[in-house]
Amino acid sequence: MCEEKHWNSSQLRRYDLQFEQIPRIHYTDPKIDELISANKPVVITGSNIIKTARDHWTPEYLEQNLGVAGHTVFSSKTHKFKYFDDSKISKNNLNGIEFIPPTRKCKMRMGEFMKKLREWKPGNDRLYLQQPLNNTVGPLIVEDFAHFDWEYVNKRQAKHNWGPLTSNLLLISQEGNVTPCHYDEQQNFFGQAYGYKRCILFPPSDFECLYPHPVFHPHDRQSMVDFDRPDYVKFPKFGNAKGCETVVEPGDVLYIPIYWWHHIESLMRGGPTVSVNFWFKGGPTSLSYPLKDHQKVSITRNVEKMLLEVLQDPKEVGPLLRSMVMGRYS
Ligand SMILES: O=C(O)C(=O)C[C@H](CCCc1ccccc1)C(=O)O
Ligand SMILES: [Zn+2]
């Protein structure tokens, strides 16, 4: 089997961490379900899950068939596209904490988006199309989507007691774009249709090393650490994070377990990339002991929300928690 490589390590950005490899396993291997049951990441290879997308969804095909509606496109002055929840930007919610949105969101037709990608020059804003697949897309895209291997996907969803499929996000990225480290509260089958993406994942237990923004912050669920220039004074445990990584290629589906941190980058000098994810609500969580790490993260979120609700001022949360713990629980 020829192992011709379609990329090399010079196309990966350099970080101060070492990473294990995420296992790549053929979709017929029962080991896949063992790892999904254990909430561990795995690259599912050789499947037909997104075969029609892998066969057809080149940027040009999408330009022809995605439809004439305006799609959600983010623009950034840097290579990083740090997500933020704009419903959390309200003045009283931030209590004077300054927030500068790192990206701008606009609606852009696919033709204009592709034109800007073709004409892009260093110094120009970078663009990232992130659009939930809905009924505005053209008939050929609907056809391809209908021919995903839903039997395989639905079998996994049922076997692992996942909740309902909430959305499929279509992602068309410029080469070199980065989605910084964050976690989602959903199970995720991340399908790679075109081009190559490096995915770095960390377990929920790395919570203490990745320093998520406070829950009320617009960057809730995102790491405060800038991977390009980590501040080891503010984030002394960052160096202890134990990540694993893979470079997904066309046809691969990466299982990103709920609450697992992930940083995703389109390879530098690798051309545009096309991905489509499958977000599922987590299943019914029965608190069984010992608690799973992701359940502890979920509990800390609830404590933060409740304290903020009663204290109102975010600046009072730290002092109250410290006075509660110091000398009594630590
Ligand atoms: O599929 C996932 O979960 C990813 O993170 C894929 C990621 C883009 C996701 C953008 C985003 C981040 C946070 C909230 C809502 C949307 C990429 O591939 O660049
Ligand atoms: Zn994500």
Image (cartoon, rainbow, N blue to C red):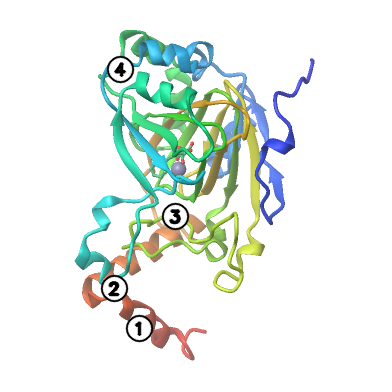
| Rendered-image quadrant of the N terminus | top right
Q: Is residue 292 among the parts visible in the rendering?
A: no
Q: Which residue is mark 4?
A: 137
Between circles 2 and 4, the one closer to the viewer is: 4
Q: Residue at 52%, 38% (x, y): give it.
A: 177
- Residue 320 badge: 1
Mark 3 or mark 2, earlier in chain:
3
Other residues around mark 4 within 10 Å, as few (<14) / some (14–19) / many (≥20) = some
Mark 3, ligand 1, within 8 Å: the answer is: yes
- Specify whether 30 is left or right of 146: right
Q: Where 59 sits versus 181, above or below?
A: above
Mark 4 or mark 1, earlier in chain:
4
Disc 2, SS: helix
Report the Cα–Cα distance between label 2 and label 1: 9 Å
Between circles 4 and 1, the one closer to the viewer is: 4
Q: Which residue is mark 2?
A: 307
Report the Cα–Cα distance between label 3 and label 2: 20 Å
At label 3, which amino acid type do we have?
Gln
Whether label 2 touches label 1, CB < 8 Å: yes
Q: Residue at 56%, 69% (x, y): give it.
A: 235
Residue 96 lies in quadrant: bottom left
Mark 3 or mark 1, earlier in chain:
3
Q: Residue at 33%, 57% (x, y): give it.
A: 218
Q: Position of residue 154 (x, y in %)?
A: 42, 25
Mark 3 or mark 4, earlier in chain:
4
